[in-house]
Image: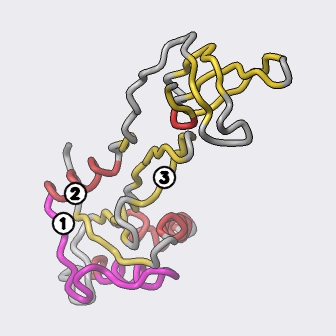
Amino acid sequence: MVMTGYWYIVQVYTGHEKKIQSNLERRLASKSDSDREIRDEILGVNVPMSTTVKNEDGKRKVRTAPTYPGYVLINVQHQVGPHADSEIGRKSWAFVQETPGVMNFLGNANPIPLSEEDVERMLATATVEEEAPVPEITFSIGDKVRVIEGPFSSFTAEILGIDTQRQRLSLSITIFGRSTPLELGFMGVERL
């Protein structure tokens, strides 16, 4: 991956990372042509996100959250800071600092740019999906199982189908002499 410019970590209010990214991007877009140098200076704002998949109560729950809560990555063309060598570096630093929700650059008045390896590692870990362990399927169609959750807890059921993708079982239970279909997660039943 070829990196351009300098990457900095900016500390922001935790839980507001995407909102602050949006605020920065909106402020950049609203800059007039006479103030285009700031727009050209800031190459990007990035909030690395991770997707986690959890199995709770037999249901798959997908959650996307910042990989580094309370931090945003900023990519700029020149080194920034209140004491930066270039005027545009000082202006960029002030522009980011004035954005509501931004607390400070990591390193305060002397921010240190990230190395290319650090940026690659931070962006790469953000795209990895952490898959919850899939329970081993020990059931077969036609097996008899006991329901252990929900209103039919302690009922005996027969497995009619297995959906490994959704981790669900199609079951048939007998209530008042009638066969009734039921769908439960793998964890909602136990072998007899």
Asked if residue 49 lies in the magenta stretch, the reply is no
The image quarter containing residue 111 is bottom left
Give yes or no for contact between labels 2 and 1 (Cβ–Cβ under 8 Å): yes
Q: Start and end of the magenta stretch?
A: 90-115
Quarter of the image with the N terminus in it: top left
How many circles with numbers are drawn on the protein?
A: 3
Mark 2 or 3, nearer chain start: 3
> In the rendering, at what x and y percent does residue 18 appear?
51, 64
Observer-nearest residue: 135 or 87?
A: 135
Give the amino acid type for the residue marked by disc 1 in the picture.
Leu
Please determine whether, in this image, residue 163 is positioned above or below residue 27: above
* Mark 1 and mark 3: Cα distance apart in space: 25 Å
Which residue occupies 56% across, 32% down?
189
Horizontally, residue 114 falls left or right of residue 150, namely left
> In the rendering, at what x and y percent does residue 153 appear?
67, 39
Q: Is residue 137 visible?
A: yes
Crowding around mark 3 (Cα neighbors within 10 Å: few <14, some 14 to 19, many 20+) is: few
Crowding around mark 2 (Cα neighbors within 10 Å: few <14, some 14 to 19, many 20+) is: some
Residue 64's tag is: 3
> In the rendering, at what x and y percent does residue 177 appear?
84, 18
Residue 39's tag is: none
Asked if residue 109 lies in the magenta stretch, the reply is yes
Q: Circle 1 sits on which residue?
A: 114
Give the amino acid type for the residue marked by disc 2 in the picture.
Val
Observer-nearest residue: 126 or 38?
A: 126
Q: Is residue 31 visible?
A: no
Q: Circle 2 sits on which residue?
A: 119
Q: Secondary structure at mark 3?
A: strand
Horizontally, residue 22 falls left or right of residue 126, namely right
* Mark 2 and mark 1: Cα distance apart in space: 6 Å
Horizontally, residue 65 falls left or right of residue 147, namely left
